[in-house]
Amino acid sequence: MRLFAAIVLVAGLLTAGCGSAGGDSILDKDTLVVGVRTDLPSLGYKRPDGKLEGFDIDVAHYIAAKLERRIRFLPVTADERISVLTKETGKTKKKKADLVLGTLSVTPERKDKIAFAGPYYNSYQDIMVQPGDTGVTKVRDLKGRKFCSLQGVDPTARLLALKGMTVQLVRAENYDQCMEKFRAGDVAAISTNDVILAGLIKRESGRKPRLVNVKISEQNTGIGIRQGDLDGCEALNRAITQMYQDKTASKLATKWFGGTGLDTSIIEVPQFEGCD
């Protein structure tokens, strides 16, 4: 995870602007419905007592406060993150969000359907291995070994395509199942975004799994928003900028990912995606 301060001048009130031309701006709402993941420890996670916690949850609270809006969280799965922001119908037609914070990488394909504020952090695909597996320092050290592979959108498949290597894939429905197989020694590694791996590592008691820090395929993570909300997007960008300027982003990264092997000390200044 690389933390960064965005190059945007903070000018005027965060709530300035008249919303979108169609009156469907986040600035026209008193309460923002924010779609979040609830299955990712340290990012967006639902505790046994029902309370939501994690980096994305805290960022959402910070941004809502800067916009002077109330907030209501809407649990979404990985597959629902786009549809809750669009007019798509189907199984998610009754679920609608104003924003989505949920490891939502900015891609050209997604920008055809939604807009993005930020990014508010960027990350890399990485690998987590067993605590004692110190001989693994690069991806090819795991050639032929067993990886946990998620059904549906699978980060491991992306890794193999990038590196042109063969491994044994052990299927799982979610990261909790992957961790069960990992603890039992049924798989040697799990590969996904480094922040997701850091959250899984932080949750473990006893000897911690090891983040290899191979840093593959940099990914910008943005706040999903409906297309056409220029004023809302710019207000979000100003809030993100303030979050880095007042050191809140750094404090939250240390709070949720500290002690996992993920470097949260690097401050970089990339361009925002731009609001249009």
Image (tube, rainbow, N blue to C red):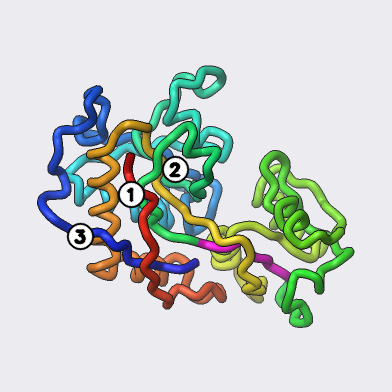
Task: Between residue 142 and residue 53, name the one nearer to us.
Answer: 142
Disc 3 marks which amino acid?
Answer: Leu
Mark 2, other Cα within 10 Å: few <14 / some 14–19 / many ≥20: many
Q: Earlier in the sequence, mark 1 or mark 2?
A: 2
Disc 1 marks which amino acid?
Answer: Ala
Tell me the element at label 3.
Answer: loop
Q: CA distance from mark 1 to mark 2?
A: 9 Å
Q: Earlier in the sequence, mark 3 or mark 2?
A: 3
Q: Are marks 3 and 2 in contact (CB under 8 Å)?
A: no
The residue carrying mark 3 is: 9
Instruction: Locate residue 68 relative to residue 7 in the image: left or right.
Output: left
Task: Between residue 19 and residue 153, name the one nearer to us.
Answer: 19
**Image quarter of the C terminus:** top left
The residue carrying mark 1 is: 60
Q: Are marks 1 and 3 in contact (CB under 8 Å)?
A: no
Mark 1, other Cα within 10 Å: few <14 / some 14–19 / many ≥20: many
Residue 131 sits above or below residue 186 on the image: below
Q: Earlier in the sequence, mark 1 or mark 3?
A: 3
The residue carrying mark 2 is: 36
Residue 49, percent across and down?
Answer: 45, 47
Residue 205, percent across and down?
Answer: 60, 69
The range drawn in magenta is 123-129
